[in-house]
Every structure is written in C-alpha cells, then in structure tokens.
Image (cartoon, rainbow, N blue to C red):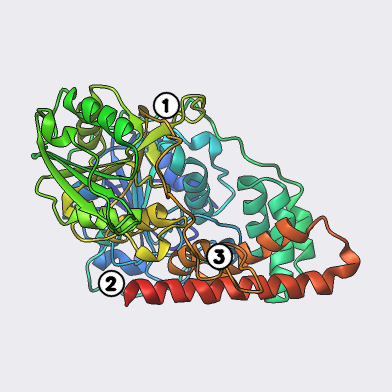
Amino acid sequence: MIIIIHDNSSLVEVLNKDLNPINYNVSKNEKLTQSVLEIAKANSQELLIWCHKDLKESLDLTGLSSVFHHKNILATFNTDKNYYLSSKIEFLERSICLNFNKKTTYGTYLMSSQVGGIFAETLLAFSKDININQSFNYSLNSIAKNYQINGLFCYSEPKLLLDNYSVIKEETISDVAFFIFVREHFKWVWVWYILIALIVYSKKYLLLPFLKSWLYSQKTIRENLNLPEVKSSIAQKYFDIDVVIPTIGRKEYLLDVLKDLASQTILPKQVIIVEQNGDIKAQSELDYLYNLGWPFQITHKFTHVLGVCNARNEALKELKNDWVFFADDDIRFHTTLFQESLDAIQKYGVKALNYSCLQPHQKQTYFNTGQTFIFGSGSSFVSSEIAKQINFNKGFEFGFGEDTDYGAKIRQLGNDVVFTANINLTHLKAPIGGFRQPIPKLWDTDVIMPKPSPTVILLYLKHFTVNQLKGYKLFLFFKIYGKKNPLKLKSHINKFKQSWNKSVFYANKLSAEANA
C-alpha cells in the first residue's frame, strides 16, 4: 500500500502502510494528477490511497480490505456538503446516483480527492483518459462518470475515515471547467441545455464558458480496457433461496415458471406465490400447486386485494432463507440460473443482482457487467437480510416506479446492485393477466390532467435533489412544447405549470395514502 498526502494542487509526502516516509522526487511544477500517475507506474501492484494533509490523522487504514475487496473499485469520500462538480451537475443527471446519505457506502460518480483509493494497475488502465493538466478531482470524476457502468465500481465511502474527522472545504470546479466536463462526458446538446438551465434557474449567463467548451469534444469510452479480473475477498457462506412471485390470471405461464424452478441445478427451498383476484366470489385457480409434486415448499397466498406492491409485501413476510429471487409470473430461465447467480454474488461481493430480462424478439445490446441504477422487481436476486428491511411503496400501485424505488432503498442501506450482463431471463409479456378492468386513478375526473404521471413525480420527489427535479421539469417542458409555436410561449408555460403542479399534488396525495 502507498499513501499519498497532498494539498489539492501538489504532493506533500508519500508514506508506506506503516506511515513511514518513502522517498519520491517531485519534478518542478509537477501537478498532483501527474504525481499520482507516476507513483502508480512505479508501484503497479500496490493499493494507492490518497488523503488531504488536513485529514491525515483521521485516515482509517484498518478496514481497507473490506472497502477494496476486489481490484476494480474506486472509493473516495468528501467531508464537505458540496461536491467538486457542484450542484450544477444536478440539472443534467436523471439517475438516483446524486442524492444519498453520506453515512453509508453509496455508488456514485461524485468522486473526491480529499480521501480515496484505487489499485494502481486499475488506475493505469485509464491513463489514456487522464489529462495531467486537469486537477486530480477533475480526473477522478471524469473516470467515474465514463466507466462506472462499464466495469469500474465507484463509491462514496465513509469507512475511509475515522468518525472524528474534521470537515474541510471541497475544491469547486470552475465555470469553464464545468462546461468542458459537460462537453466531454455528455452529448453535445446537453451543453446547450445546461446553459439554458442555469439562465432559467440561477440567472447565470455563462456564455464565455459555454463557448470555450466547444474547443473540446466528447470523450470516447474505451470498450477493451485491460482491467484486472474481479475476484472479491468477501466470502458468502449461505445459499438457501426463497422465490417471490405475484400472479394474476396467468395460470399456464406460472406453471412454466415453476417447472423452470424445479429444473434448477440448485433448487430453491421455498416458492412464495401471491395470487390476486379482484372478484370477491372467486377462488384460486392454481390447482397444480397441490395436485403436482414439487421439489420445494410452496407457500400460497390468495387475496382479493389487487396490486403488485401489496402482493410482494405480503410475500416478503414469509421469507425464511438467505436469498430471494424476485420473479414475474411470465418469465423463462435456464437450469443454471441460481448457480450462476451465486457465483456472481461470490465474484463481486455484493448482495443484489439485476438480470438481463428481454422479450423474445429483443436483442441484447449492452454486455458490460457492473454497477447499475436500474432495478427490476421481477428479475432480480437479493439478500434476504436486505429484503426483510424494506417494502414496496404502495404509492406506486397501478403505476410505474415501484421497482426503481425499491432498488434505491437497497442502495440507501449501503448496498450495491450489480447488473449481470451474462445472466439472461426471457420476459414473455403474457397477453393475459394484468388488471381485468381499468383501475380508477385519483385524477381521472380532474379537469386538468397531471403531467408527467404522479407516480413518476413521486419517485423523483423521493430520490432526486431539488436541482434534479428542476432539471427534469425543464427537460419535460422542452419535450412537450419545444416544437410548438414559440409565439404562444406564455400560454405553453402556463399550461405546463398547471399540469406539473397537479402531478405534484397527486404525488403527495399518493404518498400520504400509502403511509396512512
């Protein structure tokens, strides 16, 4: 292990794992980014840790093996409430990677030079992407932004410091560097978008930074990185599996799912089926649950209460084993699904997997296994330790967003979710089942229709920052009215505000009813 102590702009000292000084000759006017790269080249098999000089006494070296449990991890921590990329980046970002509790581990591309670490050989794999004339903070955020979903695991990690750390002010990106960052890491249209967003919401007319950014081009994300093989040192000991399946009106499809489960090379211990039927006089149609022999325990719950959130919550009450496979009632999968899942859990040292789950006519286009901000509540594999702590929010019932919300809760507990590109399920999208009749919405008879859907706003209110919500609002306005008559701009704005405010109103009402 090599420890690099710095003052933001340049190297102060280099230490070994015992905190004893190591001689390192710094070239005249050498910037911190260049120093770190040179140290990495000279110590390619070491773990590199960097730390601001004011945090040196709070550096916690005791738990680094649990933080850097495989070689493709970039973990940093920022003691300040502000981040290097500033709140301006929030106007652009549509994922849930920005709004998090700094007391727990969280996957994000918001990196910091205050304290952090990466294996030297992993850092060197990105050397071609690093401009030594940019600040170390810029380089860290750049690498994380481009490669977090392409095999690099990036975290805000409070365990890097002892609890007694002092808050130090984070370096803040300049307006020019910010626009360059947007130009290098987003499509060109977003440079225009952020200029307009800053004018609308911050009354800042940053024309010069905007113009300077056009001297740069978007960075190419390299596919064939020479990254080390992932092999987590975190051991998983227990592998008994529960399966959760909500179902409604899909008797034959569900039977096929059960047959696939019965063919697994590692059998589940329990399959929990929550059958819904809104007809108060109806009874279960799933006779084969009792007439056929199954190599696992079946726990069957029948309810007249419709809704997949309620059904999954009822199933979660029955969990008995170590892992839970969240399944839809119209998927198909191969016999080694659970074996491959447990192998992936061991390999990556995580407690939640999200599978590739495409329809038969769809072709897979994304093949990188890594961190994801997506969660599929009908195609995922999660530690029961986590699943027992959280429920599906019934405010999303009969709408969209319950799976993303559940995935966000997993992350807020300090856990990562990994998309496994090589483990595939097939989603048949069965034409029967679903809701037998239209489900009435609170806003169906309202004169002003909410836009976007109140469940979308509910999701964003729960997991976006204030600026993220503003950014989405502006984006949606352009999407709806961008090509309409600009002479009616005032009228367009008034209509949009009315439908937006109505959506916020019903989102808050859904939330209140779910928590009642």
Foreground residue, 63 or 409?
Answer: 409
Left or right, 136 with respect to 59, comes to right
Left or right, 237 with respect to 245, comes to left
Mark sitting on residue 468:
3
Label 1 and label 2: CA atoms lie apart by 36 Å
Residue at the spot of label 1: 226
Q: Please say if 156 is above or below 259.
A: below
Residue at the spot of label 2: 165
Residue 156 visible somewhere in the drawing = no
- Residue 114 position, x and y percent, is 39, 62
Circles 3 and 2, Cβ within 8 Å, touching? The answer is no
Residue visible at 31% across and 41% down in the picture:
380
Could you tell which of marks 1 and 2 lies nearer the N-terminus?
Answer: 2
Label 3 and label 2: CA atoms lie apart by 29 Å
- Residue 147 position, x and y percent, is 47, 40
Residue closest to the far front: 281
